[in-house]
Image: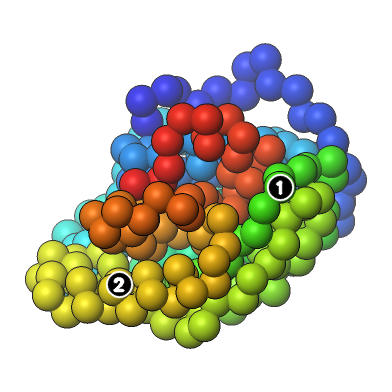
Amino acid sequence: MSQKISNAGRTPSNTIECLNISEKKVGLFVTCLVNTMRPSIGFASITLLEQAGCTVEVPELQSCCGQPAFNSGDDEGTRQIAYQTIKQFENFDYVVLPSGSCAAMIKKNFIEVFKDQPEWLARAKHLADITHELLSFLVDVCQFEPNGIELDGSYTYHDSCSGYRALHVYEQPRKMLSTVKGLEHKPLNNHSECCGFGGTFCVKYSDISNEIVGEKVENVLATEADYLLGGDMGCLMNIAGKLNREGHKEITALHTAEVLAGLAPQILGGKDAS
């Protein structure tokens, strides 16, 4: 990450007690795209987790979740990455990721690549049990409700494939966004249809990917919303890129964590998610 994440000097304003997790230690898995493309999502995640009463640490030796290798059929490459991830995160009380895609990789697919290695399979299952997607963790585990956040305008919401189908993330972001003063929800037609990103899919099948994201952009523009929100940087980057290439500047893509942490005005004064 271009700016190292640190808890030093941070004030956990708006801190609430929730389900006795106030002293639980959370390991934040930042994800590659957040680290390299949008560090503000990582900082927003820390802010929200601290407001929810968690103690957050960011292991410096974390790397990719292994999804590109897994999706390419490279099980040994996936295992090499998984060894490192398990060692870095297995001793936390919770592991939280601002990405349904990467969270699903750890929760679902690590178990598959270790099916013939009993010791590591047990450790992978333990990691799966303590791993959560950020927005669902805040609502389902912490019962967190944002307070005092304002953003004028309207938003539409894209549900990522992994978050929606693999982890059942749907109500949680909408519930928290309903507390943002001045923000109106405009439902997105085919909200859970793929955006065409799919990690290596958009590289291997770029023509098909472009057609899929083209349909997504048509639906997004039809809402006439001011903001496109979601919980996965890959989807937001893909859709925002298509919007920019076609000259559409009327809608801005933001990660939901950025809005809930009150970072949207600062980001809107700079640049969008592409």
Q: Nearer the viewer, residue 52 or 131?
A: 52
Q: Residue placed at 22% from the left, 62% from the top?
A: 68
Q: Position of residue 76 (x, y in %)?
A: 16, 64
Q: Is residue 60 visible?
A: yes
Note whether 247 is above or below 269 in the view shown.
below
**Quadrant in the picture for residue 139:** bottom right
Count of marks placed on residues: 2
Q: Residues within 10 Å of mark 2 (few under 14, many from 20)?
A: many
Is 95 in front, or is 242?
A: 242
Secondary structure under tag 2 reads helix
Q: In the rendering, at what x and y percent does residue 157 appear?
A: 56, 68
Q: Tell me if residue 61 comes above or below residue 30 in the rendering.
A: above
* Residue 169 point in image, percent of width and height: 60, 73
Is any atom of residue 131 visible in this view? Answer: no
Distance between mark 2 and mark 1 Cα atoms: 27 Å
**Toward the viewer: 75 or 165?**
165
Give me the residue at 81% from left, 30% from top: 13
Front-most of 161 and 155? 155
Q: Colour scheme used in the picture?
A: rainbow
**Quarter of the view holding residue 22:** top right
Instruction: Tell me which label, 2 or 1, sits earlier in the chain.
Output: 1
Query: On the image, which quarter does residue 72 sit in?
Result: bottom left
Q: Residue at x 21, y 74 (%)?
A: 209
Q: Which residue is mark 2?
A: 213
- The residue carrying pointer 1 sits among few (fewer than 14), some (14 to 19) or many (20 or more) residues within 10 Å by Cα, namely few
Q: Position of residue 117 (x, y in %)?
A: 31, 71
Whether residue 83 sits left or right of residue 122 in the image: it is left
Q: Where is the N terminus found, in terms of image quarters?
A: top left
Return the mark for residue 152.
Answer: 1
Res 171 label: none
